[in-house]
Image: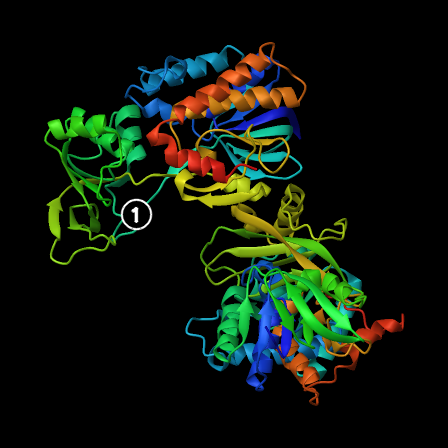
Amino acid sequence: MKKIDLVIIGGGPAGLSAAKMAAESGLSSLIIERNFKIGGQLVKQTHMFFGSEKQYAKTRGIDIAKILVNDVLKYSDMIEIMTGTTVVGLYKDKVVTLLKDEKYIKVKTKAIIIATGASEKVLAFEKNDLPGIYGAGAVQTLMNVHGVLPGHNVVMVGSGNIGLIVSYQLIQAGVNVLCVLEASSEIGGYKVHASKLKRLGVDIKTSHSIKKAIGKDYLERIIIGKLDDKWEFIEGSEEELIVDALCISVGLSPLSNLLSMIGTEMKYVSYLGGLVPLIDENYETSIENVFVAGDVCGVEEASSAIVEGYLTGLVVAKKLGYIHPNYDKLYLDFKAQLHNLRSGPFGEKLRRGLEEIMR
Amino acid sequence: MKANIVIVGAGISGVSIAYNLAKKGVKDIVVFDDNYLSGGATGRCGAGIRQQWGTKNNCILAKKSVEFFEIAQEELQYPRDIEFKQEGYLVIATTKEEDLQFVKNVKLQNSLGIPAVVLTPKEAAKIVPHLNLDIVTSATFCPTDGHLNPFTVTDAYYLAAKRLGVKFFYQEKVLNIIVKDNKIIKVITENYEVITNKVVNAAGGYSKEIGDMVGIDIPVYSENHEILVTEPIEKIQGPMVISFSLNIYCQQVPHGSFIMGRSDPNMPQGYNVDASWHFLDEMAKTAVNLLPPIGDLRVIRQWGGLYNLSPDRQPIISDVKELPGFYLACGFSGHGFMFAPMTGLLLSEIILGEKTTVDTTDLHIDRFKNSDFKDYEKSVV
């Protein structure tokens, strides 16, 4: 059985930052990444980030990914990276089982940082499995990573930041965005993103949703409708649209399955996107030396994931006896950054959610 | 709250007891469970229904239970399919000793009306073609054994009992049972105090703790038994394949997944139901050895559940001489699911002082007072 002191599951912003900070403290780690390259969802994000300089504001996601990846590659003697590798089991005796190239590998470790991120939620409607119906994240991957257009006439479902940004990116790529549907009576994302779309003439239809998809072998048309205040379709409000792609952006839910498997105490918190682990102030779960960082403990921005990664990397290293020379200063700095990222009215639901999972 | 009878545990045994009592006209039955419906051993079990046992008691309980399962859909008026699939159990022998034992077992089973037969390895391969015949010395087969969905049948009992007026409380742990002058007077739960003088202990893995509350030492202990389920594929295996010497049971369930389990001889006693990588290693080796094509399937989930083991691996279904009003349905040793119809029927008869459908002397807890209790069930994985 392979042995290593720290296993980090997920090579996105949280996992990479955790590995870097652990290495800076003197602790070696193994990053396990399901995808064929590290960087997580940042690699498909061509838009610039908000926030402060410390979390790379005004930098495009794809460039932040490059910075984080380079940071990790600088410690190639201390950070081992396994890509194309899926964690298939996580056990209480801190054995992590992996599948790589159809090979089953067991790793015994002392500490685990779970940074698996989140996955896109889906919507239930008739024929929602027709080819041509995508998650917003999948559309970003298609366009921004692979350079493939999802279609020519697209409707976006969901007006959160991702829905708005991806709609804008679709237009930039020459796709006709017919409209954005929003089930709630208000637009979900930042006004600045919504305004950009409106200026381009895109109708953001609030209190509207998709009723059904139509098509034989692939998506050909959709029926949309207006919702009443109980989110029921109003009869007679149906409208048929000719589209060849539909993009669903109705939020993310934490990828917390591995936490359930190892048996950490969990709680369903809708403000955080779904089932999340109970954590202490250092992101340690109810199982000693099992930590979380990033969206897996509550869906937020990549900037928070980066800082949570740094914080857990720093703390785990100390717990295993590797104390960063600037530990105290860094610790306070990371805590302050997280506090700032979550301050203000947009952070309110998040703050309430996080309060619910504090152990 | 007042109750005629409080049942502790709403697994398959508890719901069956509640249903049988209510059907006989008993009012004010209250059932408490500290978990959700099928949250304990019932929802974690291997879902097999077997009549091929080595002791008379187990054979009779199993046979009569199968007779109920065959009509359960109508009897319990359940609107969904309870998923009872009778495609048999193929019991594999791999040693001379087992060959001889199984011939005896089948003789016993046949004498009690169970239609089991002894097969040569070649005959066994006709029923399950992907068997590794190199390790099979003989087999026995009973076509009326099979598979039953634990979730649907427990739900069916639960709904039927509820229609008859039984009250169920989930996520409601029994904290104590108060006894005064050798009589039960009260059951205390997290949110209720129930005045009653009859309590049924159907608490599965936690039966011993319930016994301890009233000072009755039940000679059972609990142990984690692990199990896994694979991805579904098209049907290739009808019966459950089981071997005591190889330590495996493995069945393809109606939706196409394979469910399999084995016991770990080094498992410590206790209430841990964790999944282990060690189990996955051993289970994979055993399964591939006996049923080679299974090795190509992906495992989608693994979990553990509690066996509540009695000294002779046969259930305790009885009253308690030392404490009138206290009744036991425990120590099922991994087979409480398949015996549940008889558990409910017999215990309801015992509680109401009726003549029992079958002789229950050997199911009484007092059998363990003599250390030379006669039959020990060896046919257990």
Task: Please tell me which residue is depicted at 54% across the width and 48% down the height of the picture.
Answer: B301
Judging from the image, mark 1 belongs to the subunit labelled: A
Visible residue check, residue B123: no
With A212 as the anchor, is B74 left or right in this view?
A: right
With B22 as the anchor, is B138 left or right in this view?
A: right
Where residue A85 sits: x, y (%)? 50, 30
Q: Looking at the picture, tell me which residue is in the foreground, B209 or A107.
A: B209
Q: How is the image coloured?
A: rainbow
Q: Amino acid at mark 1?
A: Leu
Where residue B277 sits: x, y (%)? 64, 42
Where residue A33 sits: x, y (%)? 48, 28
Q: Looking at the picture, tell me which residue is in the foreground, A79 or B235.
A: A79
Mark 1 residue element:
loop
Examine the image and state in which quarter residue A97 appears.
Answer: top right
Q: Looking at the picture, tell me which residue is in the foreground, B35 or A215.
A: B35
Vertical position of residue B273 compared to residue B337: above or below = above
Q: How many labels were placed on the picture?
A: 1
Examine the image and state in which quarter residue B355 appears.
Answer: bottom right
What is the quadrant of the N terminus of chain B in the image?
A: bottom right
Task: Please tell me which residue is depicted at 80% across the width and 75% down the height of the picture.
Answer: B182
Where residue B300 sits: x, y (%)? 51, 47
The residue to which callout 1 is attached is: A123
Q: Looking at the picture, tell me which residue is in the foreground, A188 or A111.
A: A188
Of all residues shown, which one is farthest toward the bottom?
B355
Visible residue check, residue A231: yes
